[in-house]
Image (spheres, rainbow, N blue to C red):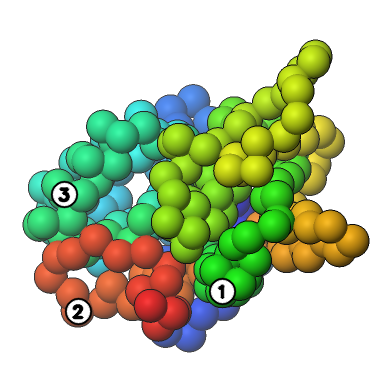
Amino acid sequence: MGRMLIEATLKDERAQLGAAFDRPGSLALGRDAAELAGLPDCGVLVTDDVVTGLKACDCLIDFTRPEGTLRHLALCEQHGVAMVIGTTGMDEAAKARIAQAAGRIPVVFAPNMAVGVNLLFKLLDTAARILEKGYDVEIVEAHHRMKVDAPSGTALRLGEVVAQAQGRKLSECAVYGREGHTGERDAQTIGFATVRGGDIVGDHTVMFCGLGERVEISHKAGSRMPYALGSLRAAHFLAGREHGLFDMQDVLGLR
């Protein structure tokens, strides 16, 4: 994801790569960031010194882990740097911390940065309202074997969109696994199925299963570039803003 972000930034005429970070001990440290993306050197070396690097930045795009993101959030808050957060697996305490920081700096925090996925959220809201009665809702997601959280943040957001559109709470109707003699399906539930394997970038499908028909709404990512391009779009959206918490629906004007 970092390589995709570097490539997308260097190819964006409205953006300038100010810094590139990696964890301490990474073999990428000290190398030219553009080299990692297969592009001519740009003069920005990969570093683990976030504090110094942020001095050259207006916005930090973060795709790490929750613990790392929260450390970076505190630094951005301290130095007045906007932040785009693509990290998933955040618990409620972490989300509250992000909302708190957004009172001082502008933040885009979304479960998925791809423009296509955020269009999917909008389409799904319409479908869920129309197909509220007589349709069972199942959400299937698939990702690479290295993904550490399940279901994906995107899948959970898909479930939230359906539940909200139908006047329900996902926490009260979600079913995250089935095994053994489960009995007849409860029509009020929203089911989730998770696949992990190989190098799958990210597939999400929401199924509305009725009698004699099935409506499926899907998004399949062939690379991580859509996430990078969406993140840059979010960074441009934050330019000039003093503070506030936004998501990709705000960035794309879909509210």
Please state which amino acid type lies under the numbered disc 1: Thr
How far is the residue under mark 1 from the one under mark 3? 32 Å
Q: Residue at x 10, y 57 (%)?
A: 104
Residue mark closest to the camera, 2 vs 1: 1
190 to the left or right of 211: left
How far is the residue under mark 2 from the one under mark 3? 17 Å
Q: Residue at x 33, y 61 (%)?
A: 108
Please state which amino acid type lies under the numbered disc 2: Gly
Q: Which is nearer the N-term, disc 2 or disc 3?
A: 3
Residue 221 seen in the current view: no
The answer to whether residue 191 is above or below residue 61 is above
How would you rate the neighbour count of disc 3 (Cα within 10 Å): few for under 14, some for 14-19, many for 20 or more? many
**SS state under label 2:** loop
Instruction: Name the spot of residue 99 as percent of width and height, x first.
Output: 20, 49
35 to the left or right of 80: right
Instruction: Name the spot of residue 224 as percent of width and height, x first.
Output: 66, 57
The answer to whether residue 8 is above or below residue 82 is below
Please state which amino acid type lies under the numbered disc 3: Ala
Residue 207, disc: none
Q: To which residue does mark 1 refer?
A: 126
Q: Which is nearer the N-term, disc 2 or disc 1?
A: 1
Q: To which residue does mark 3 refer?
A: 101
